[in-house]
């Protein structure tokens, strides 16, 4: 009987050990990360820091500044960045106009010399501005002042700068007159009236309406 009991107890011990091993194996299989989620979380821990959002594309125009000194002069502008199509305009339509030339370019035409702004806008409302300023060439008469005395009646005048053709006028024809040739209007001749004394102003105006002046003083 003792032998039988010992054998029975030994068999029960083996069975219990097998059951424990089976449950232990099942538990290990259940916890296995078959989807890789645990590995991803370990590599990418949660953070409360905010994510950077992409900034909107900046709209730019080139050149930012330009000069226009002649009626009919054209200047090309190029836009870049932004979102969608470009729409062009000017701040003063009397001074110039802008026409789209392709996807990202436009051509400005000077209608009259003056300050103006070229404006480009995209579909989302962003805009960029370029400034146009006039170039005024310094226009001078040589000599700038003349003294006629002792019976001298004649003097030659010449203009530099500006844009030809030029037109000349005498401020006081009672003191003298100015004459010039249309083909060489940058030079002029002044003839004083004999016996007329005083100060006269000679003015020259270029093709774009810019003036310059010289003073002639007539004395006995």
Image: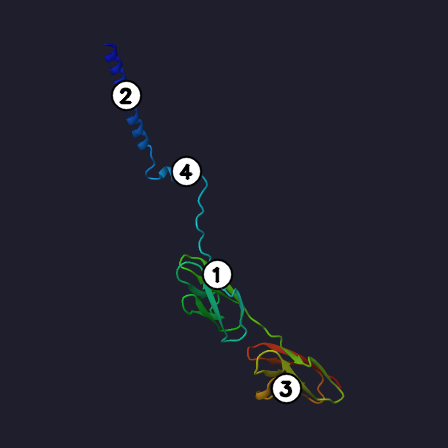
Residue with the mark numbered 4: 42
Give whichever of discs 2 and 3 has the lower sequence position: 2
1 or 3: mark nearer the eye: 1
Ranked by sequence position, the earlier of labels 1 and 3 is 1
Horizontal arrangement in the rendering, residue 107 relative to residue 67 (left or right): left
Figure quadrant of residue 81: bottom left
Q: Are marks 1 and 3 in contact (CB under 8 Å)?
A: no
> Residues under labels 4 and 3: Cα distance?
93 Å
Q: Position of residue 51 (x, y in %)?
A: 44, 44
| Left or right position of 139 against 197 | left
Q: Is residue 208 above or below residue 179?
A: above
- For label 2, the SS is helix
Marked residue nearer the N-terminal end (4 or 3):
4
Rendering coords of residue 97 (x, y %):
46, 70
* C-alpha separation, residue under disc 4 versus residue under disc 1: 44 Å
* CB atoms of marks 4 and 2 within 8 Å: no
User: Residue 60 has which mark?
Assistant: 1
| Callout in the foreground (2, 3) | 2
Foreground tag (1 vs 2): 2
- Secondary element under disc 4, as helix, strand or loop, is helix
Q: What colour-coding does the image apply?
A: rainbow
Please give the label number shown on residue 188: 3
Question: Which label lies toward us, 4 or 3?
Answer: 4
Residue nearest the viewer, comparing 11 with 70 = 11
Label 2: which residue?
14
Where, by quadrant of the figure, is residue 144 drawn?
bottom right
The first of marks 4 and 2 along the sequence is 2
Query: Residue most toward the top?
Result: 1
Which structural element holds mark 1? Answer: strand
């Amino acid at each position: 009987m003792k032998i039988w009991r010992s054998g029975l107890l030994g068999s029960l011990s083996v069975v219990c050990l097998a059951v424990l091993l089976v449950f232990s194996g099942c538990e290990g299989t259940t916890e296995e990360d078959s989807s890789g989620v645990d590995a991803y979380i370990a590599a990418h821990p949660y953070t409360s820091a905010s994510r950077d959002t992409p900034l909107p594309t900046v709209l730019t125009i080139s050149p930012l500044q330009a000069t226009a000194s002649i009626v009919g002069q054209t200047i090309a502008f190029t836009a870049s960045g932004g979102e969608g199509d470009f729409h062009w305009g000017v701040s003063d339509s009397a001074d110039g106009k802008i026409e789209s030339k392709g996807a990202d370019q436009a051509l400005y035409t000077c209608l009259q010399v003056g300050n103006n702004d070229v404006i480009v806008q995209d579909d989302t409302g962003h805009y960029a501005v370029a400034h146009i300023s006039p170039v005024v060439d310094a226009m001078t008469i040589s000599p700038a002042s003349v003294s006629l005395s002792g019976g001298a009646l004649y003097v030659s005048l010449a203009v530099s700068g500006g844009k030809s053709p030029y037109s000349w006028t005498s401020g006081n024809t009672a003191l003298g007159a100015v004459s010039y040739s249309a083909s060489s209007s940058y030079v002029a001749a002044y003839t004083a009236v004999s016996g007329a004394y005083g100060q006269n102003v000679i003015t020259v105006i270029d093709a774009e309406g810019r003036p310059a002046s010289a003073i002639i003083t007539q004395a006995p």
